[in-house]
Image: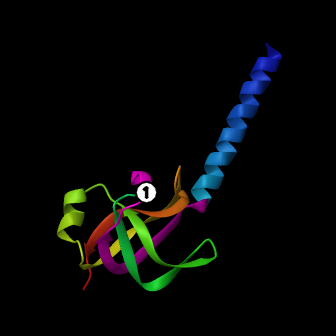
């Protein structure tokens, strides 16, 4: 019984440490650019990308565009091919065909001034 309790304690401790590391990796950004539709092989895409006005440094790499995931698809449709300002968190997703890709999980997408 003691080994079982110790195992549970270790599992909870490791899980907590992983959650803390994941929370530290989250990078919040505020970017501007042209919102456009995108497609990918196997449907591994959010369907939207932001062509950035200026390159963004993510994980030591300069990127000129980033996929956008936003809860209100109808709003994105209205803003298609327009200059927008997006705020959100940088995350990474894994796919079968595309391996790992960088995503902006947007909390706000508005027309840019």
Secondary structure of residue under mark 1 = helix
Q: What colour scheme has been applied to the protein in the rendered image?
A: rainbow
Give percent across and percent down for residue 29. Answer: 46, 72
Residue 74 placement: quadrant: bottom left
Magenta-tinted stretch:
25-44
Give percent across and percent down for residue 47. Answer: 34, 60
Say whether residue 19 is left or right of residue 40: right
Q: Is residue 107 above or below residue 58?
A: above
Can I make out residue 44 in this image?
no
Q: Is residue 31 above or below residue 25?
A: below
* Closer-to-camera residue (28/102): 102
Give percent across and percent down for residue 18. Answer: 66, 47
Mark 1, other Cα within 10 Å: few <14 / some 14–19 / many ≥20: few
Residue under pointer 1: 41
* Closer-to-camera residue (27/94): 94
Say whether residue 93 is left or right of residue 37: right
What residue appears at the point 61 percent right and 59 percent down from the top-left corner? 24
Can I make out residue 17 in this image?
yes
Farthest residue, direction right? 3
What residue appears at the point 31 percent right and 79 percent down from the top-left corner? 34
Farthest residue, direction top? 1
Give percent across and percent down for residue 106. Answer: 37, 63
Say whether residue 13 is left or right of residue 48: right
Q: The N terminus appears in which quarter of the rendering?
A: top right
What residue appears at the point 39 percent right and 53 percent down from the top-left corner? 43
* Closer-to-camera residue (111/36): 36
């Amino acid at each position: 019984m003691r080994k079982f309790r110790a195992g549970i304690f270790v599992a909870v401790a490791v899980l907590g440490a992983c959650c803390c590391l994941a929370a530290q990796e989250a990078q919040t950004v505020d970017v501007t650019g042209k919102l456009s539709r995108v497609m990918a092989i196997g449907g591994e895409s959010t369907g939207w990308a932001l062509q950035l006005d200026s390159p963004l440094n993510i994980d030591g790499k300069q990127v000129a565009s980033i996929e956008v995931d936003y809860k209100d698809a109808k709003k994105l449709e209205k803003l298609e091919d327009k200059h927008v300002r997006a705020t959100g968190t940088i995350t990474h997703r894994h796919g079968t065909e595309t391996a790992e890709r960088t995503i902006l999980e947007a909390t706000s997408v508005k027309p840019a001034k």
